[in-house]
Image (cartoon, rainbow, N blue to C red):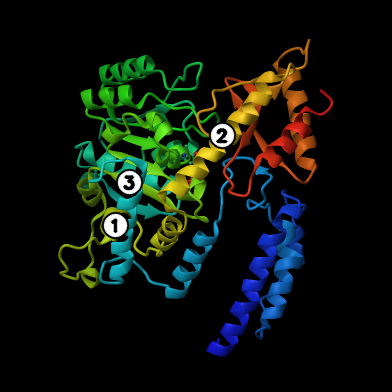
Amino acid sequence: MPLEEFEQALAEFCEWVKTYRANVAGLPVLAPAKPGDVRNALPSHPPTHGEPVENWLADLDRIILPGITHWNHPGFLAYFANTGSGPGILGELACAALNANGMLWKTSPAVSELEEVVLRWLAETLGFPSEWFGMFADTASTSTLVALAAAREAAGLNIREEGLAGKPQLVLYFSEEAHSSVDKAGLVLGIGQRGLRRIPADANFSMEVDALESAIAGDLAAGRKPFAVVATVGTTSATAVDPVQSIAEIARAHKLWLHVDAAYAGSAAAVPELRAHFAGCEQADSLVMNPHKWLFAPMDLSVLYTRRPEEFQRAFSLVAEYLRTGATNVTDYMNYTFQLGRRFRALKLWFIFRYFGTDGIAARIREHCALAQRFAGWVDAHPQMERLAPVHFSVVCFRIRPRGAGDEAELERINADVLERVNASGGIFISHTKLKGKYCLRLAIGNLQTGEEHIRRAFALISSGR
Ligand SMILES: *Cc1c(COP(=O)(O)O)cnc(C)c1O
């Protein structure tokens, strides 16, 4: 693409992006596409000859947009709503334009060094220890897998050298409310379902530490090898907080690796009055948080911190001759994880810091939490609604409970109908979950465009007819 042609196309794309962002609030938040619609609208074969940019843009509007669920929509209140902020998008643009591969310091010194600096800024912003080593990954699933691989290596069984055959059964502990990425990491690492111990959660959906202790004791008595525990700050369903402080003590007593999963809630540590939820996290061996969830970074951006980077090197360092550089006092990130090639992800977080500032970040997260509290207040005041979990951050779990309603099955049917009706409105998208077997509606605030009017609208739709 010659420079002049690229310039022209870039201008047209900028216009397209601008128009999309200006109009997104008027689009249906949930994709209207039926299964196969997008596939069937696309040609079966690639073009033999190139096509002009205008055609691609037209197809973005005609074929792709109807197949997009608009996470950018201010009425997106499902899962963990997020924000692809302006500065984040500009970071992606610069990243693609530079196309640097940060596998080694030498393959682009700025990729390694900006990553180091921005992750130190982030640790400072979140109140985490300044000596923690940080690295980017695509998702929390990857970060947790890499962390638990280091934990497995740190268990002292020489698995890197000898593999798992003939070793005692390794055991990994996490709450029944933990994210499925923890199970998946266990599966990939050869722990097996038999070694994955889901610990019961209490009435507030936090891990029961007594149950953790007795599970460990039982496994030790049976000759198994406990090696790691995952504590969650901000569980995926109810945003519950595990007692990290107590879990850390147990981990220390049994020499278990403590990994903290704060994929969603980690950003809330930027707000001083929310920091108490993170007590004990400073003792973690590793911690994951996702700026692509609640720190305004476009997909994808996950951060993994550790105070034991040498264990990651022991697990992953394997330097082929062609990758030896002799450089010293530099970070070659390929030695700390399984991936070689690395995108220049630091740019988007750098721009986010420079646009919002740490005060601006805290103010916006605080505002999201205030909106969630307001919504929870309306739920609590409504005679035919009940809240099913404490609101620690920006998510509210609740349900409709008509007077005289019958059993759980009937309540599930009533609430599932409400969910369908609300989401069919086009302007609001909420999701659902189950807490201790109870079907509940779940409203999550995480988009910078979401304001009081949107949660008011959601509440009106949900409560209409009640
Ligand atoms: C969303 C979430 C994950 C998974 O995040 P990905 O980046 O999509 O892999 C893991 N843990 C928790 C607590 C989450 O909320």
Q: Which mark is residue 370?
A: 2
Left or right of 452, for residue 172: left
Amino acid type at mark 3: Ala
- Residue at the spot 75% in from the left edge and 58% down from the top edge: 66
Q: Is residue 345 visible?
A: yes
Closer to viewer: mark 2 or mark 3: 2
User: Which label's residue is closer to the chain start, 2 or 1?
Assistant: 1
- Residue at the spot 20% in from the left edge and 48% down from the top edge: 310
Q: Is residue 316 above or below residue 203?
A: below
Residue 362: image location, x then y, percent: 45, 43
Q: Is residue 164 visible?
A: no
- Seen as rendered, the residue at the extreme right is 465
Q: In what element is the residue under mark 3?
A: helix
Q: In what element is the residue under mark 2?
A: helix
Q: Which residue is disc 3 drawn over?
A: 123
- In three-dimensional space, the C-alpha distance between marks 2 and 1, rounded to whole angstroms, equals 33 Å
Q: Is mark 1 within 8 Å of ligand 1?
A: no
Q: Quadrant of residue 50?
A: bottom right
Q: Residues within 10 Å of mark 2 (few under 14, many from 20)?
A: some
Q: Which residue is disc 1 drawn over?
A: 116
Looking at the figure, which quarter contains the N terminus?
bottom right
Looking at the figure, which quarter contains the C terminus?
top right
Residue 254: image location, x then y, percent: 23, 24
